[in-house]
């Protein structure tokens, strides 16, 4: 847990506001839930306002709570920056960039970007945390990561989008697969074959399941894993994996697999985003890493695999 310069009541308030739960906040803070409740009550009494509506499903911010959250989050981000600068001074000038990403990027893409950045900036200290999508966002919101790389289908409160690119889902398959000769596929095509799928909390799986529900399609995964990087090496016969081009690029470009885009609109709605805390001023080195990361994403975006046509007025290259 990073050092915080905020008062104890404000720290507890921020954690409850971010998690929406006293119990979850207590777990993250490593204290008893009663201690969190006590500090919230003290804060509300001292301010003379109600900050949360206590509901059966959790804690919902009131208007006063929402305003306090914006103020406290900004001060927390500034305090964390100051702490990081002080720690850098004590580390004999070491400059730190803290990253978070989902595991699909951790197998190849992010290490490649980090290796190139280290060559250009040998003095930098890089930290990478790999987590499920919602935890990646939480790491940035809690100030434990400077930048996050993840897929997203909707805006997230408290996070600033530094870069966004269309990231449609592809059907990845062996080169001899019956669907490999097609320029594109649809969900109704791929459910007829063995599917190797990521966990239900991933954006790709959620959009695929939504499309199946809309079309009344049913399927049973042949393989399911919360570690999607294990799925591509398992592909054989008539198997199909759902993935972005970036995730499968090294296999596709080596000629071992093929990637085919979906006709279904739902599977083209996902975006790849570089995220940071809203309102936080990043260090010069974090800004430089952001530029390197965006450049690498754009380079992959120019490698169009199986695309039938360019989307009209697309804001960024799809990949």
Image (cartoon, rainbow, N blue to C red):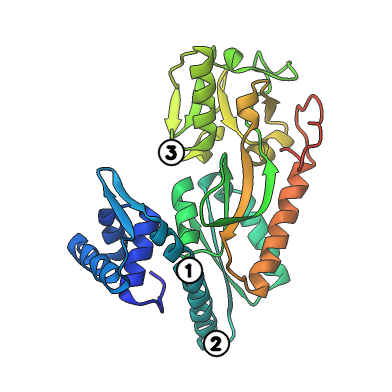
Kindly identify which residue carries mark 2. Answer: 89
Please give the name of the residue rendered at 47% of the width and 67% of the height, measured from the top-left corner.
73
Circles 3 and 1, Cβ within 8 Å, touching? The answer is no
Q: Is residue 318 left or right of residue 67?
A: right
Q: Is residue 301 left or right of residue 271?
A: right
Question: Marks 1 and 2, Cα distance to the nearest angstrom?
Answer: 28 Å
- Above or below, comparing residue 104 to residue 291 in the picture: above
Please give the name of the residue rendered at 49% of the width and 37% of the height, measured from the top-left corner.
202
- Mark 3 or mark 1, whichever is nearer to me: 1
Residue 132 in sight: no
Whichever of labels 2 and 3 marks the residue nearer the N terminus, that label is 2
Please give the name of the residue rendered at 31% of the width and 59% of the height, measured from the top-left corner.
25
Q: Residue 162 carries which label?
A: none
Question: Marks 2 and 3, Cα distance to the nearest angstrom?
Answer: 39 Å
User: Can you give x and y, in whole percent of width and height, for residue 76 in the image?
Assistant: 46, 72
Q: In which quarter of the view is residue 98 placed?
A: bottom right
Kindly identify which residue carries mark 1. Answer: 71
Whichever of labels 1 and 2 marks the residue nearer the N terminus, that label is 1
Q: How crowded is mark 2: few (under 14 residues within 10 Å), some or many (20 or more)?
A: few
Residue 200 in sight: yes
Secondary structure found at label 2? helix
Closer to us: 282 or 171: 282
Question: Marks 3 and 1, Cα distance to the nearest angstrom?
Answer: 37 Å
Kindly identify which residue carries mark 3. Answer: 226
- Above or below, comparing residue 11 to residue 111 in the picture: below
User: Can you give x and y, in whole percent of width and height, for residue 18 in the image?
Assistant: 40, 56
Closer to us: 192 or 10: 10
- Above or below, comparing residue 42 to residue 15 in the picture: below
Q: In which quarter of the view is residue 171 placed?
A: top right
Q: Name the quarter where the N terminus is drawn.
A: bottom left
Q: How crowded is mark 1: few (under 14 residues within 10 Å), some or many (20 or more)?
A: few
């Amino acid at each position: 847990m990073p050092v915080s310069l905020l008062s104890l009541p404000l720290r507890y308030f921020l954690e409850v506001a971010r998690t929406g739960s006293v119990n979850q906040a207590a777990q993250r803070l490593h204290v008893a839930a009663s201690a969190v409740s006590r500090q919230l009550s003290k804060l509300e009494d001292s301010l003379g306002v109600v900050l949360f509506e206590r509901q059966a499903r959790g804690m919902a911010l009131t208007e006063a709570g929402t305003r306090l959250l914006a103020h406290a989050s900004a001060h927390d981000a500034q305090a964390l920056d100051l702490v990081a600068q002080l720690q850098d001074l004590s580390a004999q000038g070491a400059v730190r960039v803290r990253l978070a990403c989902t595991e699909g990027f951790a197998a190849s893409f992010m290490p490649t970007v980090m290796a190139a950045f280290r060559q250009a900036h040998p003095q930098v200290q890089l930290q990478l945390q790999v987590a499920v999508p919602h935890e990646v966002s939480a790491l940035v919101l809690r100030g434990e990561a400077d930048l996050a790389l993840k897929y997203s289908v909707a805006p997230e409160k408290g996070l600033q989008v530094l870069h966004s690119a269309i990231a449609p889902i592809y059907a990845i398959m062996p080169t001899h697969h019956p669907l490999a000769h097609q320029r594109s596929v649809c969900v109704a095509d791929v459910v007829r074959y063995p599917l190797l799928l990521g966990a239900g909390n991933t954006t790709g799986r959620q959009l695929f399941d939504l499309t199946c529900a809309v079309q009344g399609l049913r399927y049973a995964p042949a393989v399911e894993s919360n570690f999607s990087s294990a799925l591509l090496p398992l592909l054989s016969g008539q198997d199909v994996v759902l993935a972005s081009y970036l995730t499968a690029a090294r296999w596709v470009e080596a000629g071992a697999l093929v990637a085919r885009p979906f006709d279904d609109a739902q599977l083209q709605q996902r975006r790849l985003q570089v995220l940071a805390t809203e309102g936080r001023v990043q260090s010069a080195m974090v800004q430089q890493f952001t530029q390197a990361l965006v450049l690498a994403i754009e380079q992959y975006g120019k490698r169009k695999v199986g695309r039938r046509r360019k989307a009209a007025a697309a804001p960024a290259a799809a990949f």
